[in-house]
Image: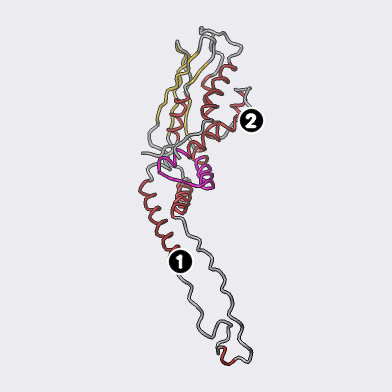
Amino acid sequence: MRHRKSAKRWAAALLSLALALGLGGCQLFPSDDYNDYDVSAYIQAFLDSSYHNSHERFLALSQSSSQEEALLNNTTTVENAAVNFCNAYGLSPNEEQLTELQGIMGQALASAQYTVMDERRIDTGYYIEVEVTPVTSLAGLESDFHQLRTQAQDEADAANAAANSPTPAPEDGQEDGDEWGDEYSEEEPDPTPTPAPTPEPVLTDARELYVDKVIQFCRDRLSQVEYQSTSVTIALDIRQTNEGELQLDMNQIESIDGSVLIFKR
């Protein structure tokens, strides 16, 4: 499951476009008067849309975006977080389990703590720092997951052994529920019935059971969200083209993604 949603790249185009459109009435070249667009407010709104699933401010600042496009900010971020979580811990969920993991990631990201500092005007555009306090509830769980994997394997082995055990045949003379047997029956014995086919036992998949245990474990961990004791500062370098368009390398946004919710200590 080592892949990421390409929609995050689409978000890069959206961010660039929205910033450019927001500057539509401004001068195209840098000058001392080029300070009427609140870039920090836009970044704050974009992060709130992506992590907290809060879109009102983002839609107000990027008037070209629809509600569906704003929702995609959060959907894509949550989906990527679930994939990164699976990659970090070597999980192979089925589709239903992946959906549950996405819900867990959405819950964790909703608790993300970050502060967007005021932008600084520089020669090439804008410089902004984002201070992040990482959520650590889902970090460093290798030992816990190893125990869950062992439990899942033991439970699956026991369940499968029971499913494969032969069913004891009824004792002679008691197939009809007559404790005295056919020798005392006045009726002619029934012809030997054709035995019904024995259904194949449904085996327990240890891997699926393991992921189910991981999902429940993560839900329990998020009942009280934990944060790193120290914050992380991520710098955003927003470039302004000669045409006045503001551009942001989305790798910088992905650095924030990897800091607000961490899986490795």
Q: Nearer the viewer, residue 13 or 36?
A: 13
Q: Nearer the viewer, residue 75 or 113?
A: 75
How was the colour assigned to the protein in this rendering? secondary structure
Does label 1 or label 2 sit earlier along the sequence?
2
Q: Residues within 10 Å of mark 2 (few under 14, many from 20)?
A: few
Disc 2 on helix, strand or loop?
Answer: helix
Residue type at mark 1 is Asn
Label 1 and label 2: CA atoms lie apart by 53 Å
Residue under label 1:
164
Q: Main secondary structure of the magenta part?
A: helix
Of the two numbered discs 1 and 2 in the rendering, the one whose residue sits closer to the viewer: 1
* Residue 175 found in image quarter: bottom right
Let me know if residue 92 is in the magenta part.
yes
In the displayed structure, 200 sits above or below 261; it is: below
* Residue 138 found in image quarter: top left
Q: Position of residue 249 (x, y in %)?
A: 47, 22
Which residue is found at the position 64% from the left and 89% from the top?
Answer: 187
Let me know if residue 119 is in the magenta part.
no
259 sits to left or right of 58: left
Numbered label tally: 2
Which residue is found at the position 54% from the left and 20% from the top?
Answer: 16
Label number found at residue 93: none
Which segment is the magenta one? 83-105
Q: Nearer the viewer, residue 261 or 85?
A: 85
Label number found at residue 67: 2
In the displayed structure, 145 sits above or below 108; it is: below
Q: Position of residue 219 (x, y in %)?
A: 48, 48
In the displayed structure, 31 sits above or below 187; it is: above
The quadrant of the picture occupied by the N terminus is top left
Residue type at mark 2 is Gln
Q: Position of residue 86 (x, y in %)?
A: 44, 42
